[in-house]
Image: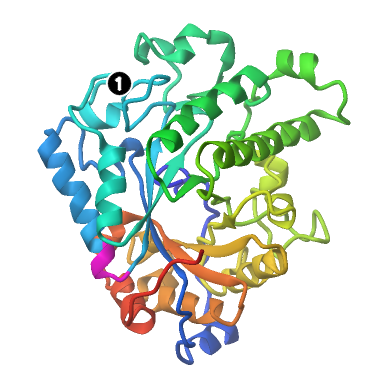
Amino acid sequence: MRRMSRRAFTLAALAVPVTAARGAAAAGPAPRASAEMRGMWLATVGNRDWPSRPGLTAAAQRKELIAHLDRAVRDRLNTVIFQVRPTADALWPSPYEPWSEYLTGTQGRNPGWDPLGTAVKEAHARGLRLHAWFNPYRIADHADPSRLAASHPARKHPGWVVRYGGRLYYNPGLPEVRSFVQRAMLDAVARYPVDAVHFDDYFYPYPVAGQTFDDDDAYDRYGGAFTGRAAWRRDNIDRLVRETAAGIRRVRPGTRFGISPFGVWRNASTDSRGSDTRAGVQTYDDLHADTRKWVRSHWIDYVVPQLYWHIGHATADYAELAAWWAGVAKGTGTQLYLGEALYKAGAAGQPSAWQDPVELSRHLTLAARHPEVRGHVFFAARDVAADPIGAMGRVVADHYGRTAKPPC
């Protein structure tokens, strides 16, 4: 999630007239719940939100981090989802993986402080929940293993690695990979009283035209019991989700587990259970992530679908998807929050809806009609702070007049 997962893969937005649904959504905010998710993602991959650049002193990095937490408090948010393992690395002293290059500019170099430990302590001191955000399988945004730290597990185990789309990924089809990434992530859960473990939308990578994710050897070894490669891949991701949930319960009972998938599970034209959308990407088919199953089976505590389209979008209408996800979550025990594209508000090249500072406020008004929607998470911290056209300020004024506790 996030500079990476919320950029090139969102469908091409289409400018559309204000629809009846949108007009109805503008009628006025519904009463707010006394407990609701009010979150923001704090992305570190590529220094998207924090730190502002690699190589800052420990004191400067800490100051910037605290500023993001303080801004969350000022906007009456209650949760920060902090990316602590952006590329098979760590923002804490991990015995499994190297320090992140986004801290010092050199992967494996000790930054001289503990960002995750500090974030947990300072968030809790401000009454904020801190969710630790991990990317299970992404290794690097380049395809050269020699650029990784010499101690990197991907260099020690080259058979775990797949080059695809100019990037490096761990192979989800290898049981030893699945076991390793869980140990690496659960180390942070064991060390720190994080309030939740959070995954975004990266499982198998997004499709790249003309390229094949080469997992032939793993499929030959482990795929024989399945009807095809896609079913085997989905089972691999299902196992990751179930095993991670069990590991969290074992290591730190009471810590929650949530996932923020791409907003379209399947189009109705593909599957009658799907949404009335025409998305070019479907998580079930393209990322091999059966997100609907995870919610319906209550394998996860919460889900935050990335609904990064405006109300009335011709291909993927926010109103349609909010209603669809509410139906999926109904009666499951899995809490539903909606991921909001704050980064699009006022951004160059976005359709006219995103130039209107009221668009996001309309999202919250519309979503409040669905009792299954228990809150919202905004992408991302840099945009919360900058708020170039006042879209976040309008959300706060219209909907966050008083503080609210996060849902249990």
Residue 331 picture location, percent across and down: 72, 68
> Residue 399: percent from the left, percent from the top?
39, 81
**Residue 382 appearing in the image:** no
Total labels: the figure holds 1
Residue depicted at 31% across the width and 71% down the height: 76
Residue 394: x and y in percent read 32, 78
The colour scheme used to paint the residues is rainbow
Above or below 312: residue 225? above
Compare residues 399 and 386 and report the one nearer the observer.
399
Q: Which residue bears the numbered disc 1?
A: 107
* Predominant secondary structure, magenta span: helix
What residue is shown at x 49% (from left), y 33% (from top)?
186
Q: In this view of the protein, which residue sits in the foreground, 291 or 182?
A: 182
Left or right: 256 in relation to 240? left
Q: Circle 1: is it few (<14), some (14-19), or many (20+) Cα within 10 Å? A: many
- Quarter of the image holding residue 106? top left
Q: Position of residue 105 (x, y in %)?
A: 23, 25
Amino acid type of disc 1? Gln
What range is drawn magenta here? Answer: 72-76
Report helix, strand or loop for mark 1.
Answer: loop
Q: Quadrant of residue 188?
A: top left
Check residue 219 for magenta coloring: no
Residue found farthest to the bottom: 27
Residue at screen point 65% across, 72% down:
323
Instruction: Identify whether 211 is placed above or below 148.
Output: below
Rendered residue at 31%/24% (across/down)? 99
